[in-house]
Image (cartoon, rainbow, N blue to C red):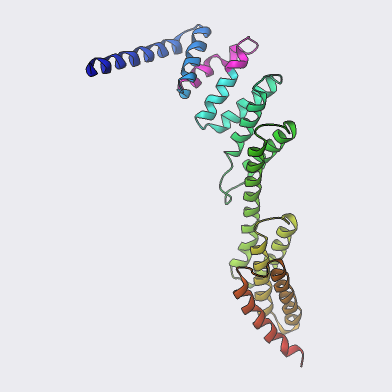
Amino acid sequence: MKKFISVLLILVALSSCSSYQKALKSEDVAVKFDMATKMYEKGKYARAIRLFEQIAPSYRGKPQAEKMFYMYAKSFYAEKQFYSAGYQFESFASSYPKSEKLEEASYLGAVSYSNLSPVYSLDQVDTYKAIDKLQSFINNFPDSQYLAEANVKVKFLREKLEKKSFEIAKQYNTTGQYIDYNSALIALDNFIADFPGTPFKEEALFYKLDSSYKLAINSVPAKMQERLLSAKAAYGVLVKFNPNTEFKAKADDMLVRIDTDLKQFSK
């Protein structure tokens, strides 16, 4: 019985494969559409895409076009071909603004772009694009069932941009070259101004203190007092922001050195 079932399954598979190949070679778009739909419903999205690609140009304007282009976009999404999925969902939303699938298509199109967002260390062009798409969805569908998810994704993407900006600012400090401490202070000030609610604010304030401190202790005598006072002010801002900051021990060590060096100017 087991052998019979195995043989039967092989025959069914071969028959299905044969039918699929016939549909690929067929000149009848209806045959291709029916087979593509079967492949889609079975979760064989790569096969469905091959057939949809063949009939898409000739299906525009036909009664079943809306269904076809929806399945076409969903197939790309399921296959993680997010560039194509994003494009197809956008095209669907533009072509069928009254579709019952409009909200879902608009959301999945935006999510497709968010899935293209790279790690923070790489170029963030796709991240900016994803934020624009998701924000557009949020504005167009303020009561959407996907609203909470969309807001979470926007928050994640924005934090990625903040991380990128912060790491660039911090890099001026961690190079350890005297000439970079001024650049670090400018970059960190700009970062804090641009992202006032950033989760990296405490760390940014610490690196601002660290840059101020290193700039001060390596200064020529004529500029040292002013820079030491600036460093002391940076310490005050950090501990005011978080009295129990994780950087407290390092900051306190810097403050001792700052106060010690300032004594020479009070004589």
Q: Is residue 61 above or below residue 206?
A: above
Q: Quadrant of residue 9?
A: top left
Q: Position of residue 256 (x, y in %)?
A: 65, 82
Q: Position of residue 41 (x, y in %)?
A: 48, 19
Q: Position of residue 192 (x, y in %)?
A: 72, 59
Q: Is residue 142 above or below residue 219?
A: above
> In screen coordinates, is 38 left or right of 11?
right
Give the residue drawn at x 66%, y 69%: 181
Q: Residue furthest bottom?
A: 267
Give the magenta-colored segment's residue range: 47-68
| Quadrant holding the N terminus | top left
In magenta segment, residue 66: yes
Give the residue drawn at x 71%, y 19%: 98
Dominant secondary structure, magenta: helix
Q: Is residue 85 above or below residue 263?
A: above
Q: Position of residue 48 (x, y in %)?
A: 49, 19
| Quadrant holding the C terminus | bottom right
Give the residue drawn at x 45%, y 13%: 24
Q: Is residue 45 above or below residue 29?
A: below
Give the residue drawn at x 30%, y 17%: 10
